[in-house]
Image (cartoon, coloured by chain):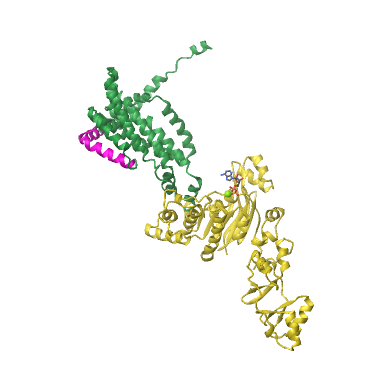
């Protein structure tokens, strides 16, 4: 048996994948290059713009929003206030804005891509059975594996970070959208149809509103996964708090690493609470 | 005129529908077909028609195919075979666009668990069908408000459904169905989720509304009492087939087979049978022609102690007793006018037996059944009792 295995030559899987990847990056260069350049520049500009706003203003606005979305309680508001002031105080404000930009753009793209795919899955059994294993694959692969094609397509910086994040973080939004729509009570769907709704009317007036809390829970997960990519993406040169953690790691500088990590945690908690508040739990 | 006409309508759930249909033709039962083909017969070759303005009740035990049948009528479920004509158009063969038009304008549905949209206000819920049609906000809110007022919810427009009781929620469901002024309303166990008292209230309300609206209503229920209370016609279903269609009385009085007989044997007949069913032809005398002598003779012949008096046009005038008649005879009176009594208990032919029972208990003379002042018949006490006991023959063909 062992002999038998020795007689079979090793299948050149790795070279194939490499070849395939470089084929894609060559063939779609016309697409990737402007993404890499213009989109990348746009992202940096956006982060710069945020950083140009006096931090006090942003901090106060965030605290104010926190106050209102938490039902006028001061817990989240005061946490946001103190946490963000601390990040500012530690001289990490610009990095925070960069990380926030990465999370924001990656999450928005994930949602824009993920929700329609989820809708498609909910409407078609065939689509569901094709897409589900792909989602499983995307989520079980270690996240930094996606860095390799990301670099191949977009070299280094924020854009490949967002690309890797898309692959890694989109599945929950897709899954929860599908689940949310499939869970809508059959009678409600029938009611919509019985009054003569078109497919689109049914979707937008009944299914999506009913599925909204579930979809928002998926989006919340997507955002948190994007955030976890902040550190991983720094390995391919995405700027921000993650890069501080990484360089501290390389210098075995515990203190700096901890402070940058704390910045990420603060960002994570604020984003998590903010997105959770949109899940519509407050409405009966 | 019939507004709905169903011809050979069948629905088989599962993969082997063709095979299952063939087996149905061969007379195999639903159970056998399930075993042989793994397909479930939902509705089995039903044909019936529904007249405009009537309440057509489809009744049967759970699983007998009622929900499937009603969903075939607006094609929420596609039929396996057969035709459904609404106003002469065959719904089963319609394209999607026409189907939407029919659903929007001709028929609407009320659901067992209300199926209200929890994120919309009562007003927006009621306006849903109109919104779907693209009617502008001002107009649809006005119409929705009107139909909410009809069901007594004019003061709850801005509430969310979850803030209302079950009965009120179903009123919203009713208002939503009424708002686009359909010809046909489909109600699938619309009151089954409500507790008995509320349920009865809703039945009464539906009947009240129906007085003025004159919609065609297809009402599904598993409850015979409910069916008898509100149905103009009842179709009884078993294993996907319609076993009998008829008026409530026909079903009770003239069950088509043992299944129906068993189904109806526990029914409280007093709530169903009317004065018309148990009245008999009265012995009368004519006040214009006859005097005390004839009255007395007639009573002796029939062995009764009082007799009803009409005029030549059968208008009820009153009654005379044997005692009064013989006194009048002794006094040599020629006319009945002076001894005529007018306190006879009177009902209409629609009066239900449970009401008649009360009256007959307190009365010494037979109850009169009167329409437009004319005497149609009388009800003697014994007739009430024996009809309640289900022993007597009763009159059919309630006009
Ligand atoms: N979607 C479905 N798939 C398979 N079988 C069904 C489906 N819907 C109903 N049935 C079957 O069809 C029969 C009739 O069901 P239904 O119309 O719901 O009865 P009812 O409303 O009288 O309780 C039952 O045997 C039920 O199991
Ligand atoms: Mg049912």
Note whether B198 is above or below A72 in the view shown. below
Q: The green chain is which one?
A: A
Horizontal and vertical percent position of residue B334 = 72, 88
Q: Quadrant of residue A154?
A: top left
> A193 and B57: which one is in front?
B57
Using the rendered image of the protein, determine whether residue A37 is visible from the camera's viewpoint: no
Horizontal side of B216 relative to B262 (left or right) equals left
Q: Please give the name of the residue rendered at 58% of the width and 48% of the height, measured from the top-left corner.
A: B80
- Image colour for chain B is yellow
Figure label count: 0
Residue A125 appears in view: yes
| Quarter residue A142 falls in | top left
Residue B157 versus residue A209 in the image, above or below: below
* Residue B165: percent from left, percent from top: 49, 52
The span picked out in magenta is A40-69
**Relative to residue B324, is residue B227 drawn left or right?**
left
- Name the quadrant containing residue B53: bottom right
């Amino acid at each position: 048996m062992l002999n038998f295995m020795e007689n079979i030559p090793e299948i050149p899987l790795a070279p194939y994948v490499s070849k395939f990847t470089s084929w894609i990056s060559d063939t779609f260069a016309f697409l990737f290059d402007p993404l890499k350049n213009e989109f990348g520049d746009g992202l940096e500009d956006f982060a710069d713009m945020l950083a140009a706003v006096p931090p006090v203003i942003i901090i106060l606005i965030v605290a104010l929003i926190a106050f209102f979305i938490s039902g006028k309680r001061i817990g989240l508001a005061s946490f946001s206030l103190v946490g963000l002031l601390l990040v500012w105080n530690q001289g990490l404000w610009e990095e925070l804005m960069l990380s926030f930009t990465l999370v924001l753009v990656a999450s928005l793209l994930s949602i824009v891509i993920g929700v329609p795919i989820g809708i498609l899955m909910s409407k078609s059994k065939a689509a569901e059975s094709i897409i589900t294993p792909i989602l499983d694959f995307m989520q079980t692969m270690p996240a930094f594996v996606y860095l390799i094609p990301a670099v191949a397509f977009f070299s280094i910086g924020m854009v490949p970070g967002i690309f890797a994040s898309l692959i890694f973080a989109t599945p929950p939004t897709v899954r929860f959208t599908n689940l949310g729509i499939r869970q809508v009570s059959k009678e409600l769907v029938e009611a919509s149809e019985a009054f003569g709704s078109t497919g689109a009317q049914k979707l937008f007036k009944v299914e999506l509103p009913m599925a909204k809390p579930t979809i928002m829970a998926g989006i919340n997960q997507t955002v948190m996964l994007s955030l976890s990519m902040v550190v991983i993406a720094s390995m391919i040169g995405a700027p921000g708090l993650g890069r501080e953690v990484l360089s501290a790691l390389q210098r075995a500088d515990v203190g700096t690493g901890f402070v940058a990590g704390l910045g990420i945690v603060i960002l994570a908690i604020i984003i998590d609470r903010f997105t959770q508040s949109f899940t519509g739990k407050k409405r009966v | 005129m019939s507004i709905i006409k169903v011809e050979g309508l069948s629905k088989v759930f599962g993969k082997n529908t063709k095979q299952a249909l063939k087996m149905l033709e061969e007379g195999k039962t639903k159970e056998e077909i399930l075993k042989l083909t793994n397909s479930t017969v939902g509705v089995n070759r039903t044909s019936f028609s529904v007249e405009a303005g009537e309440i057509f009740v489809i009744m049967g035990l759970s699983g007998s195919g009622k929900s499937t049948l009603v969903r075939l009528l607006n094609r929420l479920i596609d039929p396996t075979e057969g035709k459904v004509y609404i106003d002469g158009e065959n719904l089963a063969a319609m394209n999607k666009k026409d189907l939407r038009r029919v659903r929007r304008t001709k028929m609407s549905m009320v659901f067992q668990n209300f199926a209200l949209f929890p994120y919309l206000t009562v007003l927006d819920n009621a306006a849903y069908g109109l919104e779907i049609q693209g009617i502008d906000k001002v107009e649809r809110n006005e119409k929705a408000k009107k139909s909410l007022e009809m069901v007594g919810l004019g003061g709850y427009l801005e509430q969310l459904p979850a803030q209302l009781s079950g009965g009120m929620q179903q009123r919203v469901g009713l208002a939503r169905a009424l708002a686009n002024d359909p010809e046909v309303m489909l109600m699938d166990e619309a009151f089954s989720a409500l507790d008995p008292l509320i349920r009865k209230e809703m039945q009464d309300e539906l009947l009240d509304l129906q007085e003025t609206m004159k919609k065609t209503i297809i009402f599904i229920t598993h409850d015979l009492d409910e069916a008898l209370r509100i149905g103009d016609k009842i179709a009884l279903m078993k294993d996907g087939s319609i076993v009998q269609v008829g008026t409530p009385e026909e079903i009770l009085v003239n069950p088509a087979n043992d299944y129906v007989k068993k189904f109806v044997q526990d029914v409280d007949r007093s709530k169903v049978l009317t004065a018309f069913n148990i009245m008999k032809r009265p012995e009368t005398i004519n006040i214009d022609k006859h005097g005390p002598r004839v009255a007395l003779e007639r009573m002796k012949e029939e062995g009764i102690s009082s007799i009803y008096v009409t005029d030549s046009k059968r208008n009820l005038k009153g009654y005379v007793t044997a005692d009064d008649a013989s006194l009048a005879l002794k006094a040599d009176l020629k006319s009945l006018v002076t001894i005529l009594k007018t306190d006879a208990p009177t009902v209409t032919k629609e009066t239900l037996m449970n009401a008649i029972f009360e009256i007959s208990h307190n009365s010494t003379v037979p109850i009169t059944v009167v329409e437009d002042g004319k005497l149609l018949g009388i009800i003697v006490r014994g007739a009430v009792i024996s009809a309640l006991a289900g022993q007597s023959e009763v009159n059919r063909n309630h006009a």
